């Protein structure tokens, strides 16, 4: 890469920003000024080792996003010392200080802010090019850290693992089964799967299926009881209430049907549990009726150990999605995992099977 090629590429990136509504003149002036001033040092770094330079740039971007080396290290599955060393190498190659360091927080310097603004949107293209070349030499590798709930993960994600590992033997799964919402970036997770997760800054998602809740009870429990004609009749039965572990509250639910009619529903709190799988199992034991997500209920419905009540009615609780850090600098191992899960849900028609409206 020549100096003119580098400056032309950076100018093009800034013009792209301007076309999206960003202040193009400001971007062009700060990006080209910084690139020109430190070209010789930066070119030497690129020529020595492109991969090492990309790692240094990624450490810088993640540290800036997380405002600390430790949080960036968890995201990159590196040690804080390695991330700090990468950033220091980048600073040395550029000849400028990018961060002001303190015992409590990292703060971008003015030069650091300009450099982050100038390069952030180009890193994805650079990584994609390197990944495409790397894929010709071998498969994606490394630890794949994923979080999901226990029952959903065991029933629907774990069965995908044999085929996934057969295709990508260099990936080492490191999975956590937990109801808790994890912080993908600060806790160093590559992905999380679930419903109702808040999208933190730097996190994106792809929808896998609807998160619909339905009313269920066991055949034994219903044997001596009159089946409700509509959701209002659920309140007359023993209820297994689900208390949200994040808030400690029992939510009032709104059931609807395909015609658009709606009923506010609150079950009797005969029993209160804080885990969705536990409420499902309690219903199987004949302890009452509960509102549960279709993925939890589906195996029991198929076996006949649970029966759906008011089958035209359901609660819309959003969607089940796969969450991962911003597409910028997305590792190959994460990209192939996300694509594999999305394709598996499409192939097995799980979005249709999980829809309480059908």
Image: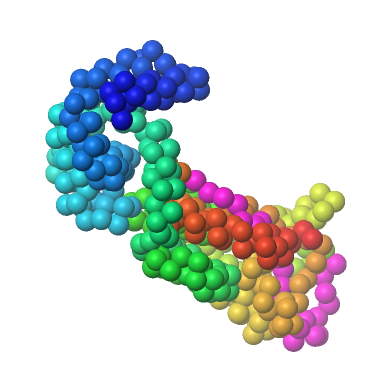
Q: Is residue 222 magenta?
A: yes
Q: Does the magenta stretch include residue 107?
A: no
Q: In this view, does 307 lie to the left or right of 102?
A: right
Q: Position of residue 139 (x, y in %)?
A: 42, 60
Does residue 60 appear in this view? no
Residue at x-position 36% and y-position 50% = 185
Q: Is residue 12 above or below residue 252?
A: above
Q: In this picture, which residue range is highlighted in magenta?
A: 202-229
Q: In this view, does 332 lie above or below 220?
A: above
Q: Position of residue 102 (x, y in %)?
A: 14, 40
| Image-quadrant location for residue 265 | bottom right
| Image-quadrant location for residue 305 | bottom right
Q: Is residue 358 left or right of residue 181?
A: right
Residue at x-position 20% and y-position 20% = 37
Q: Using the image as rendered, state which of residue 354 and residue 290 is in the foreground.
A: 354
Residue at x-position 21% and y-position 40% = 48
Does residue 125 appear in this view? yes
Q: Using the image as rendered, state which of residue 47 and residue 81 is in the foreground.
A: 47
């Amino acid at each position: 890469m020549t100096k003119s090629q580098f400056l032309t590429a950076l100018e093009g990136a800034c013009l792209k920003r301007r076309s999206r509504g960003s202040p193009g003149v400001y971007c062009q002036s700060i990006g080209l000024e910084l690139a020109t001033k430190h070209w010789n040092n930066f070119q030497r770094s690129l020529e020595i080792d492109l991969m090492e330079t990309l790692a240094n740039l990624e450490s810088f971007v993640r540290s800036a996003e997380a405002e600390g080396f430790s949080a960036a290290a968890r995201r990159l599955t590196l040690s804080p010392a390695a991330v700090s060393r990468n950033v220091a190498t980048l600073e040395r190659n550029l000849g400028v200080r990018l961060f002001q360091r303190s015992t409590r927080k990292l703060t971008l310097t003015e030069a650091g802010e300009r450099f982050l603004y100038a390069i952030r949107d180009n890193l994805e293209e650079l990584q994609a090019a390197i990944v495409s070349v790397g894929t010709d030499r071998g498969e994606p590798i490394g630890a794949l850290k994923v979080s999901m709930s226990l029952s959903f993960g065991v029933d629907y994600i774990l069965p995908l693992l044999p085929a996934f590992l057969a295709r990508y033997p260099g990936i080492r799964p490191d999975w956590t089964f937990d109801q808790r919402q994890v912080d993908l970036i600060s806790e160093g997770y590559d992905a999380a799967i679930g419903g109702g997760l808040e999208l933190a800054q730097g996190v994106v998602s792809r929808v896998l299926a609807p998160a619909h809740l339905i009313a269920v009870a066991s055949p034994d429990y219903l044997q001596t009881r009159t089946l409700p004609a509509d959701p209002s009749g659920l309140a007359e039965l023993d209820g297994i209430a689900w208390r949200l572990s994040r808030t400690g509250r029992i939510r009032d639910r709104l059931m609807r049907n395909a015609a658009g009619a709606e009923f506010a529903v609150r079950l009797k709190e005969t029993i209160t549990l804080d885990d969705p799988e536990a409420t499902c199992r309690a219903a199987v034991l004949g302890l009452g009726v509960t509102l549960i997500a279709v993925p939890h209920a589906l195996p029991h419905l198929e076996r006949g150990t649970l029966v759906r009540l008011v089958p035209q009615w359901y609660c819309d609780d959003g969607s089940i999605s796969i969450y991962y850090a911003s597409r910028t600098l997305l590792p190959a191992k994460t990209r192939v995992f996300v694509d594999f899960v999305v394709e598996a849900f499409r192939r097995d028609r799980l979005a249709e099977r999980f829809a309480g409206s059908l």
